[in-house]
Image: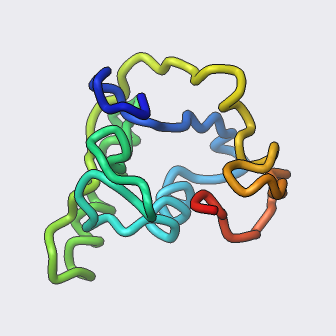
């Protein structure tokens, strides 16, 4: 994925209990963590494989996400670049990429990945 030659997106899959957290709250986290106007990248990582997006699994998720994207459009002068598409098959990364930040990422400094952690993600060193 890092080379950009596969056509895949570097992504995560989120499993959640809708009795514990609503889909709208997951979207709050997404939009609170990314700049949805950045085309093909975030932070120091650029290329089509680093594009951002919300990939829905159900019609309900699609409807909630579409409404949220419409709200987000009003907050920016530039167009929203984040994708909104149906989820495709998810392929886990190689083992050495699993829990990457928890293992220390590029910086070698482990990051808290426990449920409820609020530490800012240090993906870029």
Q: How is the image coloured?
A: rainbow
Up-down relation of residue 107 to residue 83 (above or below): below
Q: How many marks?
A: 0
Image point (50%, 70%), residue name: 32
Residue closer to the observer: 10 or 20: 10
Residue closer to the observer: 121 or 28: 121
Q: Left or right: 80 with respect to 52? A: left
Q: Left or right: 101 with respect to 48? A: right
The percent position of residue 74, horizontal first and vertical second, equals 21, 79
The percent position of residue 25, horizontal first and vertical second, equals 56, 60
Image point (75%, 69%), residue name: 118
Image point (36%, 21%), residue name: 88
Q: Looking at the rendering, which quadrant does residue 86 occupy?
A: top left
Up-down relation of residue 80 to residue 6 (above or below): below
* Quadrant of the frame with the C terminus: bottom right
Residue closer to the observer: 72 or 61: 72
* Quadrant of the frame with the N terminus: top left
Image point (82%, 58%), residue name: 109
Up-down relation of residue 66 to residue 16 (above or below): below
The percent position of residue 11, horizontal first and vertical second, equals 48, 37
The percent position of residue 102, horizontal first and vertical second, equals 80, 47
């Amino acid at each position: 994925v890092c080379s950009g030659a596969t056509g895949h997106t570097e992504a995560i899959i989120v499993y959640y209990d809708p009795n514990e957290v609503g889909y709208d709250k997951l979207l709050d986290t997404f939009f609170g963590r990314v700049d949805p106007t950045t085309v093909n990248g975030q932070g120091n990582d650029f290329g089509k494989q680093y594009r951002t997006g919300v990939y829905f699994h159900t019609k309900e998720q699609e409807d909630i996400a579409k409404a949220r994207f419409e709200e987000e459009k009003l907050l920016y002068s530039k167009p929203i670049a984040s994708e909104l598409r149906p989820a495709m098959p998810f392929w886990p990364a190689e083992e050495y990429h699993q829990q990457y930040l928890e293992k220390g990422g590029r910086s070698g400094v482990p990051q808290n990945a426990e449920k409820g952690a609020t530490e800012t993600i240090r993906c870029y060193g």
